[in-house]
C-alpha cells in the first residue's frame, strides 16, 4: 500500500510559544496524511485539546517524555495502521547529548510491519550533532523490518565548508545503518529561495528510509496563507530588517519550517 507521510517542525521552541495555533491543527487535518511526525512539539497546558482534535480526525499518537523541553510526536491514522509498540526510552535533558527521538512500530492493512521514527538533532556543537545522529542510527538499525524516519537534522546549508557536520557527514552516518536520505529541492527554513543559489540552501528537513520506496514531494509552505499576520513576508519565515540591520523571524509558536512530505511503499509492495 502507498501511504502519505509528512513531517513538520512546529516551532514551539521549548514552550516559548503559547500553544499550538488552530491553523496548525487545520493544516494537519487538511493534509490528510497517513503518518505525521512533529518536531519542536511542547507539552503546553493546551496540548490535550490538540490531541483530542487529532483523535477526532482519526489519528492515534505517541509522544516523547522529555518533560519541559522539545518533544517529538508521531501520529497515524487508526483505520490504516495498527499500533504495536512505542519506544520513548530516549529522554532529552539539558545535561545529556540525546536527540529528541521517538520510535513507533505499526502494522498496515496488508500485515506489513513498519517502524516510524521522528527525531530532531539539537542546536549543539557540530561534533555533538554527529554523535546524536550516530545514536539515532545505532538504535534504529536494530529494527528488522522497513523503517521510515522523518527528521530535522539542523545540518547547515547544502555546501557548507564545516567539515564536522554537513550533508555528506549525515549521509555517511546514515549509510552505517543502511539508511537513505530523501531531501526536496529548495530551503525548508528561512526564505523560500536562497539568494545565492543551491549551495547556500538550508534544507534541514528530510525523509530517511530503509527498505522503502519514496515518491518525494516538494517542501510545502502553503500553510502561511492561513495566518497573514503571523507570516507578514508570505512564504519567507525570515527577512532582513534594513532599518535596524538585523534578521527578523516569525514568532515562536508559529511554524518556521516547511512541511516535508512524500508517498511511500515498502519494497515488498513493489515485488507483488
Image: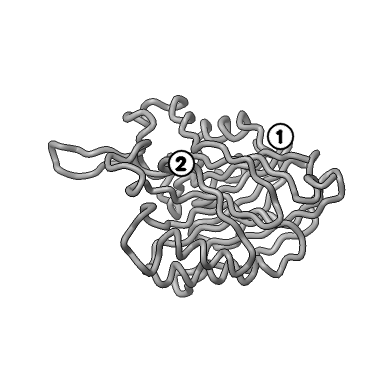
The picture places residue 51, in percent across and down from the top left corner, at 64, 43
Of the numbered discs 2 and 1, the one sitting upstream in the chain is 1
Image quarter of the C terminus? top right
Q: Is residue 54 visible?
A: yes
Q: Secondary structure at mark 2?
A: loop
Count the labels in the image: 2
Work out how far the residue at label 2 is from the one at label 1, CA to CA, in angstroms: 34 Å
Mark 2 lies on residue: 185
The picture places residue 262, in percent across and down from the top left corner, at 61, 40
Q: Quadrant of residue 243?
A: top left
The picture places residue 150, in percent across and down from the top left corner, at 58, 51
Q: Secondary structure at mark 1?
A: helix
- In the picture as drawn, the residue positioned furthest to the bottom comes out as 95
Q: Is residue 41 left or right of residue 49?
A: left
- Of 256 and 261, nearer the camera is 261
Q: Is residue 154 left or right of residue 214?
A: left
The nearer-to-camera label among 2 and 1 is 2
Residue under the image location 55 percent in, 43 percent down: 46
Does 50 sit above or below residue 32? below
Mark 1 lies on residue: 56
Amino acid at each position: 500500500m502507498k501511504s502519505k507521510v509528512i513531517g513538520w517542525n512546529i516551532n514551539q521552541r521549548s514552550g516559548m510559544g503559547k500553544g499550538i495555533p488552530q491553523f496548525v491543527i487545520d493544516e494537519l487535518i487538511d493534509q490528510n496524511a497517513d503518518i505525521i511526525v512533529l518536531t519542536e512539539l511542547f507539552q503546553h497546558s493546551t496540548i490535550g485539546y490538540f490531541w483530542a482534535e487529532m483523535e477526532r480526525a482519526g489519528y492515534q499518537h505517541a509522544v516523547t517524555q522529555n518533560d519541559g523541553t522539545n518533544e517529538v510526536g508521531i501520529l497515524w491514522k487508526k483505520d490504516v495502521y495498527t499500533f504495536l509498540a512505542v519506544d520513548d526510552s530516549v529522554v532529552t535533558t539539558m545535561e545529556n547529548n540525546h536527540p529528541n527521538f521517538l520510535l513507533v512500530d505499526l502494522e498496515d492493512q496488508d500485515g506489513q510491519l513498519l517502524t516510524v521514527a521522528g527525531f530532531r538533532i539539537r542546536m549543539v556543537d557540530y561534533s555533538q550533532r554527529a554523535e546524536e545522529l550516530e545514536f539515532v542510527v545505532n538504535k534504529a538499525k536494530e529494527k528488522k523490518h522497513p523503517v521510515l524516519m522523518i527528521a530535522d537534522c539542523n545540518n547547515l546549508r547544502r555546501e557548507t565548508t564545516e567539515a564536522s557536520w554537513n550533508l555528506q557527514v549525515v549521509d555517511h552516518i546514515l549509510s552505517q545503518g543502511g539508511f537513505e536520505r530523501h531531501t526536496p529541492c529548495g530551503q525548508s527554513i528561512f526564505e523560500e529561495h536562497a539568494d545565492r543559489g543551491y549551495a547556500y540552501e538550508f534544507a534541514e528537513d528530510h525523509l530517511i528510509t530503509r527498505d522503502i520506496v519514496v515518491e518525494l514531494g516538494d517542501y510545502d509552505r502553503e500553510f502561511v496563507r492561513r495566518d497573514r499576520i503571523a507570516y507578514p513576508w508570505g512564504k519567507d519565515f525570515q527577512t532582513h530588517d534594513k532599518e535596524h540591520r538585523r534578521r527578523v523571524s516569525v514568532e515562536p509558536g508559529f511554524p518556521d519550517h516547511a512541511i516535508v512530505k512524500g508517498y511511500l511503499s515498502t519494497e515488498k509492495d513493489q515485488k507483488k
